[in-house]
Amino acid sequence: MSDGTLDGAWPAAGRPFGVKGFGARALAVSDNAGGVIVLWSLLTEPEGRMQHILANGNVAPAWPVEGLVYGSNSPYRAPVEDGAGGVISSWLLMPDSEGNAYFVYGQHILDEGMPDPQWPQTLYIANTDSDSPADPRAVSDGAGGAIVAYEGYDFIAMIRVLSSGQVDPAWPANGLRLGTLASAIPALVPDGGDAVIAAWTEYRSGNNYDILAQRVSLSGSTAGVPPLPTSAVAMLRVTPTPTREMCTIDFTMPVAGRAAITIHDVEGRKVAEVLRGEVGAGPQRVTWRGRVDGRRVPNGVYFIRLESDRGARVQRLVLAR
């Protein structure tokens, strides 16, 4: 409650609901009436689930007791309220085992606990052009739709989904690209009018991360962010991720020069050094087998850092044996 006490109408130990299982991860959005819509996914189910909890702590009577099944069990999801008591959920999924990139999909669930009949059962939104998934972001467009942002291969992009269940044709296919050079997924916030403001980080200077922001109108226009020349820093790509053992590190040097590739843990500590020395111009390839001095490193998230005379690039790697 506003005074910091528990709501007496709710169970003191919390309201249990939904299906129990392994790998549950919950996200939530407001129903704009004092309640909440909670979304979660289980590794034991191919789809995701969501449930509507009213302000009094009870499950909305029109919703299935064990939660409404929807979309996918992808852990990479971004729900946003639709302004009418429902929710628009977007998620990342690789279409098949042979795919080499994650796609962004979406679905609209109405406040009465049923899919919006105007929408496709699963709406295709965009191709990320990346095999390294990261959580998308979403914010309401104020008109019953959503602005979805995602991280692609060496870029970030935003795209608008209309309340009618269509990707806005006024926006570029696969989204308006904002950042480049190892950009991180942006934070989004409505500006209170007809635009959204995005903030993100990227290697614009070639030495350290820069913090950038841009205002994007609902029509998909922007004042523009001056692009960095493609020859400024080397390109970097790490595949596959997640990986059980070996990963391939592909990079392209715009000009010959010194380069170093190092592996770092989530706390920034250097774990291993894969390459250091003079490298010729053009495409290059090295591998790392997830070992240091012959011993396997623990499972988890690592960062591959490429440093050259022209700047630096970073890509994420997940080890999951």
Image: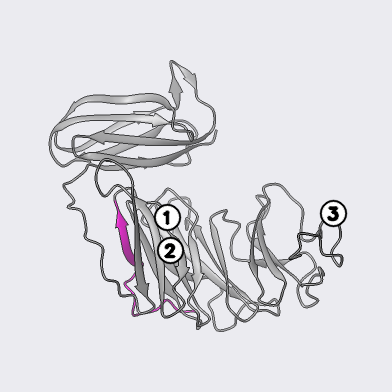
Range of the magenta residues? Answer: 165-180
Q: Nearer the viewer, residue 25 or 115?
A: 25
Residue type marked 1: Ile
Residue 206 location in percent, x, y?
24, 43
| 23 is within the stretch colored magenta | no
Q: Is disc 3 in contact with disc 1, using a CB cutoff of under 8 Å?
A: no
CA gap between label 3 and label 1 equals: 35 Å
Q: Which residue is mark 3?
A: 13
Q: Nearer the viewer, residue 41 or 12?
A: 12
Q: Which residue is mark 1?
A: 185
Q: Residue at x 43, y 63 (%)?
A: 149
Please give left or right for residue 26 compared with residue 278 in the image: right
Disc 1 secondary structure class = loop
Residue 277 location in percent, x, y?
21, 24
- Colouring method of the image: one colour
Residue 292 location in percent, x, y?
44, 20
Residue 318 location in percent, x, y?
48, 39
Q: Note whether 139 is above or below 300 in the view shown.
A: below
Q: Which residue is mark 2?
A: 149
Q: Is disc 1 in contact with disc 2, using a CB cutoff of under 8 Å?
A: yes
Disc 2 secondary structure class = strand
Looking at marks 2 and 3 on the same chain, the residue that comes earlier in the sequence is marked by 3
CA gap between label 2 and label 3 equals: 36 Å
Image quadrant assignment for residue 249: top left
CA gap between label 1 and label 2 equals: 7 Å
- Quarter that holds the N terminus: bottom right
Residue type marked 3: Ala
Q: Is disc 2 in contact with disc 3, using a CB cutoff of under 8 Å?
A: no
Image quadrant assignment for residue 127: bottom left
Question: For the stretch drawn in magenta, what is the main secondary structure?
Answer: loop
Image quadrant assignment for residue 195: bottom left
The answer to whether residue 296 is visible is yes
